Image: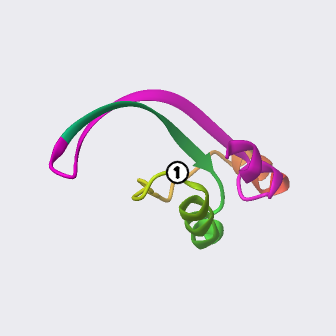
Amino acid sequence: MAKLLIKNKLAACVSIKQIFSIYKWDDDIEETKEFEITIKSKLEFKDYLIEFLNENSTYDVPQIIYKKYNAEMKYYDWLNKTI
């Protein structure tokens, strides 16, 4: 998924880390190893990213959280040149 996001110019960078989650699903408490991804992109791509993630996720209910961040100008320039 990360390579597709970059290839399709929806993200300049994707960070991936393995996490352990405990959550309730269908009245059961589940424990599972998962991967959390952080996508560095433009706010204007938010709707495209949400659609992409919903279409390409293996989850029935993927966790999609987005925030607007301020970035140092050098990073912001790199991001804009990259995507």
Q: Is residue 77 magenta?
A: no
Quarter of the figure with the C terminus = bottom right
In this rendering, the count of numbered labels is 1
Q: Position of residue 59 (x, y in %)?
A: 46, 52
Write the start and end of the magenta stretch as one range. 1-28
Please name the residue shown 59% across and 64% down the image: 55
Q: Position of residue 81 (x, y in %)?
A: 84, 54
Q: Position of residue 5 (x, y in %)?
A: 72, 52
Tell me the element at label 1. Answer: loop
Residue topped by disc 1: 58
Please name the residue shown 49% across and 27% down the image: 18
Could you tell me the amino acid type at mark 1? Thr
Left or right? Give the position of 8 relative to 54: right
Please name the residue shown 71% across and 52% down the image: 11
Q: In the rendered image of this protein, does residue 37 appear above or below residue 7? A: above
Comparing 73 with 81, the one in front is: 81
Q: Is residue 15 magenta?
A: yes
Q: In the rendered image of this protein, does residue 34 appear above or below residue 75? A: above
